[in-house]
Image (cartoon, rainbow, N blue to C red):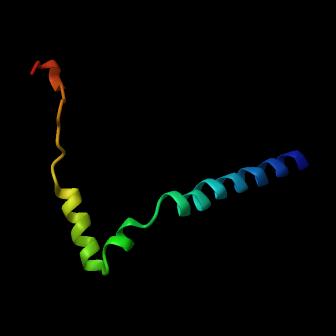
Amino acid sequence: MTVGKSLWKLIIIKIFIIFGIIKLFFFPDFLQTKFSNDNERAAYVMESISQPVNMINSNFGGQKK
């Protein structure tokens, strides 16, 4: 029983390290640093979502270019 508890503690610590600490150092809050208010952030996100995907070098359907 003590081995199981020790393993669960180790798993919880690893998950905290992976999602907590690494996120702070490698994934900064892009929207917070680029825009000053929520309206600008929302406009940027809507613009990014609504842009069509550029399909360069796609070969759907087996057609030759």
Give the answer, above or below, for where 31 lies relative to 27.
Answer: below
Residue at image point 19% right, 30% down: 58
Pick the front one: 54 or 7: 54
Quarter of the image for residue 35 reads bottom left
User: Does 50 sit left or right of 29 as displayed?
Assistant: left
User: Does 21 sit left or right of 36 as displayed?
Assistant: right
Residue at image point 87% right, 45% down: 3
Residue 8: % across, % down: 77, 51
Q: Is residue 17 visible?
A: yes
Residue 63: % across, % down: 11, 19
Quarter of the image for residue 41 reads bottom left
Pick the front one: 52 or 31: 31
Give the answer, above or below, for where 53 lies relative to 39.
Answer: above
Tally the marks: 0
Residue 47: % across, % down: 19, 62
Residue at image point 54% right, 61% down: 25
